[in-house]
Image (cartoon, grey):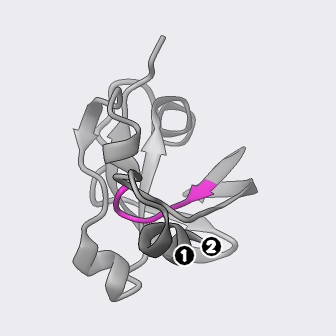
Amino acid sequence: DAAAIRAEVSGVQYVSAGVHESARVVAGDRRWFTRLHGAETDLPRIRRSWTWKYGRFFSEGEFEDSVQVAVLGTVASERLFGANTDPRGREVRIWNQPFEVVGVVASTN
């Protein structure tokens, strides 16, 4: 659907296909059940109000190469790694698969 929108709908500037479901995220002995949003690299352009507490969004190269990286929300990051802890470079497991944390989106509150 996203490819068709990109190709056929005029006036649409950015499109980010994705999946949305609940998932258990694990870091060491800590677990957090949260909402997972799998997306494409245009998502930060769509969510222009996002600011970064730590790091960045995943790159086009990481997306194209299916590199297992993750961007966390502030609440998930704090539950898994502790408040005011930069988790970049650390591992989380989603569906028992390892992902490297590359960024944390700041809360909008």
Task: Indicate the position of residue 83 as horizontal and vertical percent values.
Answer: 42, 25
Q: Secondary structure at mark 2?
A: loop
**Which residue has dot 1 on it?**
4
Task: Indicate the position of residue 105 as horizontal and vertical percent values.
Answer: 38, 36
Residue at the (62%, 66%) spot, across then down: 94
Q: Secondary structure at mark 1?
A: helix
Q: Quadrant of residue 80?
A: top right
Q: Residue furthest top?
A: 109
In the image, is 66 to the left or to the right of 31? Answer: left
Q: Quadrant of residue 34?
A: top right
Whether 84 is drawn above or below 57: the answer is above
In the image, is 21 to the left or to the right of 97? Answer: right
Residue at the (64%, 53%) spot, across then down: 36
Whether 25 is drawn above or below 68: the answer is above
Residues rendered magenta in the picture: 37-42
Q: Tell me, yes or no, whether the two marked residues, 2 and 1, touch with CB atoms within 8 Å.
A: yes
Q: Amino acid at mark 2?
A: Asp
Task: Indicate the position of residue 14 as horizontal and vertical percent values.
Answer: 37, 54
Examine the rendering and report whether any part of residue 98 can be seen. Answer: no
Q: Nearer the viewer, residue 13 or 30?
A: 13
Q: Amino acid at mark 1?
A: Ala
Task: Indicate the position of residue 87 as horizontal and vertical percent values.
Answer: 34, 47
Which SS type dominates the magenta stretch?
Answer: loop
In the image, is 87 to the left or to the right of 78? Answer: left
Q: Nearer the viewer, residue 47 or 54?
A: 47
Question: Which numbered dot is residue 100?
Answer: none
Examine the rendering and report whether any part of residue 91 can be seen. Answer: yes
Whether 38 is drawn above or below 56: the answer is below
Q: Dot 1 surroundings within 10 Å: few (below 14), some, or many (20 or more)? A: few
User: Quick one: quadrant of the N terminus?
Assistant: bottom right
Residue 23: in magenta span: no
